[in-house]
Image (tube, rainbow, N blue to C red):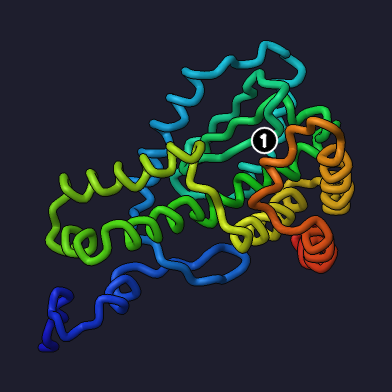
Amino acid sequence: MKNKINFLNPLIPISLIPFLISCATVPYTGRRHLILISPREEMAMGGEAYKKTLNASKLSHDKEAVEMVRRVGERLASVAEASGFKWEFNLIEDPKTVNAFCLPGGKVAVYSGLLPVAKEEAGLSVVMGHEIAHALARHGAERMSQGMLANFGGAALSIMLANKPAATRDLYAQAYGMGIGLGVMLPFSRSQEAEADHIGLILMTKAGYDPHETIEFWKRMEKSSKEPNSPFGKYFSTHPDHGERIQNIQGWIPEALSYYKK
């Protein structure tokens, strides 16, 4: 019988412990990344944050716009192959906010300020596909895991390994709380934003939308961002450079079209 590994053995470098615990693979890109949070915990926190956000927001009563958001969302959800997701799609009335998000478990919200730039379903599918891609790639859990390592280090890992569920939940809550203070979720890195562009492009194409619309949408976003008092600056602050983004998307379109043909 093989000897069991003692993860708390001081001879094992602390830097190696995370990789022995959990390493997940991002769909479509195949990137391997560290995840210290279970999908169940992640979705529970996402659901709670979603309820709080909706309770603190004014939902749109524009029937046509609400139906468009849900129609696009349902088409994207149908091709997302997201196990365990319980999808919800809502439109928040806030013309000054140009954004959308998808929390773990498929909890999606679009702010009404995004609609004038999206113009139609294809444009809206660009952003919704991008945000859903963040959830599929578990970027939030990845950022939370990084935060847990940075802020709690070996102590957090020791608690997990000691199988103390209550204390572990407290750590999750603290890590998630840091995210709430910075927005709906922890801000994504530029590399994660680029990965979401890539996966989102595939999702919208699988859902039947023209991937070339992605380029036109980001051109409209860039043009709007240059207008005086534009609300787009904050949106672009963590996103790839516009020229780099367009170049990346152009390179990914042939791959996306291969999914469209299937």
**Towards the viewer: 138 or 87:** 138
Q: At label 1, which amino acid type do we have?
A: Asn
Q: Quadrant of residue 19?
A: bottom left
Please state which of residues 8 and 150 is positioned toward the viewer in this rendering. Answer: 150
Residue at which label 1 appears: 99
Q: Residue at x 81, y 46 (%)?
A: 209
- Quadrant of the image containing the N terminus: bottom left
Q: Position of residue 238 (x, y in %)?
A: 64, 51
Q: Is residue 202 left or right of residue 25?
A: right
Q: Is residue 230 visible?
A: yes
Residue 105 image position (x, y, % from top left): 47, 41
Relative to 164, residue 178 above or below: above
- The secondary element bearing badge 1 is classed as loop
Q: Residue at x 80, y 61 (%)?
A: 249
Q: Is residue 101 above or below residue 216?
A: above
Residue 29 percent location from the top left of the image: 61, 68
Question: Residue at position x 34%, y 53% from top?
Answer: 38
- In the picture, the quarter occupied by the C terminus is bottom right
Q: Is residue 16 above or below residue 49?
A: below
Q: Which residue is at the far top?
A: 61
Q: Foreground residue, 121 or 192?
A: 192
Q: Position of residue 76 (x, y in %)?
A: 67, 43
How many C-alpha atoms fall within 10 Å of the one at disc 1: few (<14), some, or many (≥20)? Answer: many
